[in-house]
Image: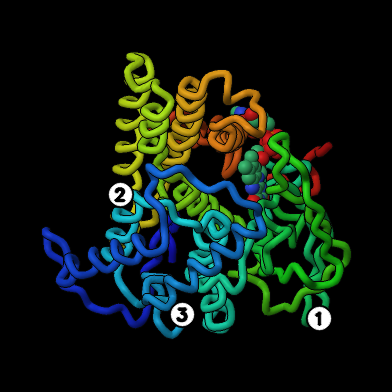
Amino acid sequence: MPTGTVAVVAETEMTPQPATDDGFADEVEFTARVEGFLADHCSRISDPADDESEAHGLVRTRAFQRALVDAGLAGLTYPTQLGGAGLTPLHQEVFTRVSAGWRLPNGPLAISHGMCLPMLAQFGTEEQKARYLPDSISAETIWCQMFSEPGAGSDVAGLSMRAVRDGEEWILDGQKVWTSGAHYCDFGIVVARTDPTLPKHQGLSMFIVDLREPGIEVRPLVQMSGARGFNEVFFSDARIPAGNLLGEVNQGWNLAVSMLMFERVSIGAGGGALNARRGPELAALARDLGRATDPVIRQGLADLHIREEIKGYIGQRIRSSVAAGRVPGPEGSIAKLNGAILARRTRDLAMSIIGTAGQAWDDGDPSSDVAARWSSFCISAAGMSIAGGTDEVQRNIIGERVLGLPREPDPFKGAPWQDIPRN
Ligand SMILES: Cc1cc2nc3c(=O)[nH]c(=O)nc-3n(C[C@H](O)[C@H](O)[C@H](O)COP(=O)(O)OP(=O)(O)OC[C@H]3O[C@@H](n4cnc5c(N)ncnc54)[C@H](O)[C@@H]3O)c2cc1C
């Protein structure tokens, strides 16, 4: 399992590791093993990143994941019989700590490993785990998350997509949107309404969907950066086996909350490509462009360093909590909000360093690669404040669950979903 993932404690086949205040028995040896592996397969975060096509990125991701499997470093905390390494959350913590200094080519697995894999491990039946976990860990299959709809984003519990039971199948009808990566994914986890007569949070269920099945159409959306990261996914009488239900019927909201928690932790406090430290690369860039003596740039770099350190500690705290068997609550929202703010500060600092060259360049310019990459990051940074629940939604959660402020008024609380007015 790459970083960017909440360590899920494997229920079986844990290798007992005598943990002490100083770590665990083979920590030194394990740390050296991880360092050796990363040195062989990744570049340092202070090195400029390669700009590559999506297709090439996927090939690289899969090759990297296969190398992790071969080295016994994939799916660290998952049982070996399910394709994992059967190690402990302490091993995961070491991996996360060491890999913070490296650029892991695992971006396309952020949702698959950061959210879907822990959901399957936590809520899947034994049959589902045996069927899906090994290929997901090795990246033979890649997964996406299908929650948002045109009429349900922040209020995802209000979603309209229907799932109706028909014998040994469920029939899915409706539309999802902003589905990251669906165009290259094999499977998705989808939430649909199974009982519209219940209040909105109570009539939802979660399903595993094979995106290649008939009745499912994935249509890519083009972003302002020119990238095609999102999709609309249309379900038209799509039939899926009854065995694809994840968890219990009408209990989907509880699972959705868990998945959102995994998402927020993954965005805000995981490691890996999604939220790698960018301070060292920006410091190197400032030196290369002769901006390292500018006092404002130096202040910005120091500020970024401090905030990235804080992000690391928030992540460590959440992972320790998970390792101790606790389910992280609103700290996931704190991590996510902090990650989003950090992304915007990084964007602003990057543009201050690069200057006008970050806004327009000729292909032949010596720094055109750097400018193109950072300008693409800058355009995408705002998305961090929206994905996984907007900054406002995270502030609402923190207000209610950390500060004890009154809940948002809901005039339709307890009303059947079908009676709530919708656009
Ligand atoms: C990079 C990125 C990747 C994404 N990937 C996925 C994915 O893979 N799968 C998926 O299902 N979705 C995905 N999304 C969608 C994302 O979850 C939604 O965009 C997000 O939840 C917001 O929903 P919305 O766009 O419908 O905005 P709305 O909910 O319509 O919100 C509009 C504005 O109103 C504010 N607002 C709404 N409700 C409240 C409130 N109660 N209090 C205060 N302010 C409020 C919001 O903060 C926002 O500013 C992705 C989005 C982005 C940007």
Question: Disc 1 vs disc 2: which is toward the camera?
Answer: 2
Q: Considering the image in quadrants, where does the C terminus appear?
A: top right
Given residues 179 and 199, the one toward you in this image is 179
Percent coordinates x, y for residue 101 in the rendering: 33, 49
Q: Which of marks 1 and 2 is nearer the N terminus?
A: 1
Q: Does the residue labelled 2 lie within 8 Å of ligand 1?
A: no
Q: Specify few, some or many for label 3: CA neighbours under 10 Å numbering under 14, 14-19, or 20 or more.
A: many
Check disc 3 and report the residue beneath it: 83
Tell me the quarter of the picture where residue 188 sits.
bottom right
Residue plotted at (59% across, 57% down): 57
Looking at the rendering, the quadrant in which ligand 1 lies is top right
Question: Disc 2 vs disc 3: which is toward the camera?
Answer: 3
What residue type is disc 1 on?
Gly
Dot 3: what SS? loop
Check disc 2 and report the residue beneath it: 316
Real-space CA distance between mark 3 and mark 1, rounded to the nearest whole angstrom: 33 Å
Q: Considering the image in quadrants, where does the N terminus appear?
A: bottom left
- Label 1–label 2 contact, CB within 8 A: no
Vertical placement of 165 versus 217: above or below? below
Can residue 204 be seen here? no
Given residues 178 and 309, the one toward you in this image is 309
What residue type is disc 2 on?
Gln
Percent coordinates x, y for residue 173 in the rendering: 84, 60
**Residue 78 vs residue 229: left or right?**
left
Q: Which of marks 2 and 3 is nearer the N terminus?
A: 3
Residue plotted at (41% across, 63% down): 41
> How is the model colour-coded?
rainbow
Check disc 1 and report the residue beneath it: 167
Vertical placement of 401 versus 83: above or below? above
